[in-house]
């Protein structure tokens, strides 16, 4: 029997407008009645996830910032700060890539350089980071860095950002989170690692878990559960890694599979 569901957000649970499915609240209540817990697992900031799930913030487990921070009841269960000197070096490298915007993600909030503080970037950033500050120099930030993120508005991050940041692959996890974003964080940290830590904490086995994802930063999450679902709109690597397929995010695929879970199909 499935007792815990992990779900990515963008391209997975959320629709094409970045909104929760209209019936999510009712579905969540049915899952809760059956003793099934729900854990958003996202590259988004914790504060952003709490904003989206405000009505259930005291009931969910939040896997934020690609697994670098796990929260429950506003208490930190796990985090993985990056060495400060290394984080600043990564940010300097990012600043040298033409046309790319940078965000230093700290435990408290996200930080963007004053040179990147433009309306179009603010709008993009607001999808993932709800608490942010503008700084003149990343070295002035008084916070523990947990992730460094870089955005290419043209949607070619795999060509423009990823090759440059692969220089850090021996020291940091370098992850393509979407066509626009590349994230760097500590080695040995991922949504999948976070999922396994939560399983151990709750005494739940991988066979009692389901997970949904669509992009490269969901690959390890697919490995952490028995019932792994790739969205119809997922990249090929996720479809190859997952055990099952779900309808696309625009067709409320997570909701459709949750109906099947409640019907006992995976018991």
Image (spheres, rainbow, N blue to C red):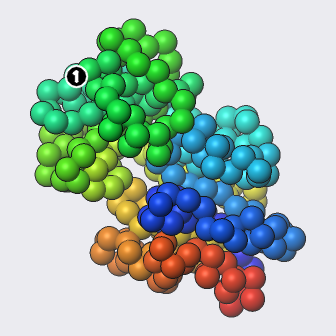
* SS at circle 1: helix
Please say whether residue 140 is visible from this viewpoint: yes
Residue beneath the point at 16% across and 36% down:
99
User: In x, y percent, where is residue 187?
Assistant: 38, 42
Please say whether residue 66 is visible from this viewpoint: no
User: In x, y percent, where is residue 59?
Assistant: 79, 51
Residue 79 vs residue 56, the one in the foreground: 56
Relative to residue 140, is residue 13 depicted above or below?
below
Q: Relative to residue 41, is residue 140 drawn left or right?
A: left
The residue furthest right is 33
The residue furthest top is 140
User: In x, y percent, where is residue 227?
Assistant: 57, 77
Residue 31 vs residue 188, the one in the foreground: 31
- Residue 179 position by quadrant: bottom left
The residue furthest front is 119
Q: So how many labels did they put on this image?
A: 1
Residue beneath the point at 35% across and 60% down:
216
Q: Residues within 10 Å of mark 1 (few under 14, many from 20)?
A: some
Residue beneath the point at 46% across and 77% down:
248
Q: Quadrant where the C terminus lies?
A: bottom right
Relative to residue 187, is residue 93 depicted above or below?
above
Q: Which residue position holds label 1?
A: 92
Residue beneath the point at 56% across and 25% down:
108
User: In x, y percent, where is residue 37?
Assistant: 75, 63
Q: Quadrant where the N terminus lies?
A: bottom right
Residue 228 vs residue 156, the one in the foreground: 156
- Residue 148 position by quadrant: top left
Relative to residue 72, is residue 90 depicted above or below?
above
Q: Relative to residue 55, is residue 163 drawn left or right?
A: left
- Residue 34 position by quadrant: bottom right
């Amino acid at each position: 029997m499935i007792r815990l569901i992990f779900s990515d957000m963008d391209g997975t649970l959320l629709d094409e407008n970045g909104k929760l499915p209209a019936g999510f609240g009712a579905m969540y209540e049915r899952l809760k009645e059956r003793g099934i817990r729900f854990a958003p697992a996202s590259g988004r900031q914790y504060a952003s996830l709490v904003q989206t799930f405000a009505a259930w913030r005291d009931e969910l487990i939040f896997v934020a910032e690609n697994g670098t921070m796990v929260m429950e009841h506003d208490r930190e269960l796990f985090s993985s700060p990056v060495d400060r000197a290394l984080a600043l070096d990564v940010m300097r490298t990012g600043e040298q890539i033409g046309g790319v915007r940078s965000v230093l993600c700290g435990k408290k909030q996200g930080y963007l350089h004053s040179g990147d503080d433009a309306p179009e970037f603010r709008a993009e950033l607001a999808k993932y980071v709800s608490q942010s500050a503008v700084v003149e120099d990343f070295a002035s930030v008084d916070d523990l860095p947990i992730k460094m993120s870089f955005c290419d508005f043209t949607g070619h991050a795999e060509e423009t950002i990823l090759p440059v940041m692969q220089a850090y692959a021996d020291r940091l996890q370098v992850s393509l989170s979407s066509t626009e974003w590349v994230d760097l964080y500590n080695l040995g940290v991922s949504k999948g690692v976070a999922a396994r830590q939560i399983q151990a904490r709750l005494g739940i086995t991988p066979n009692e878990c389901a997970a949904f994802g669509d992009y490269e930063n969901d690959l390890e999450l697919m490995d952490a559960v028995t019932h792994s679902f790739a969205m119809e709109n997922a990249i090929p690597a996720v479809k190859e890694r997952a055990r099952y397929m779900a309808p696309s995010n625009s067709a409320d695929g997570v909701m459709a599979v949750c109906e099947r879970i409640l019907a006992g199909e995976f018991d």
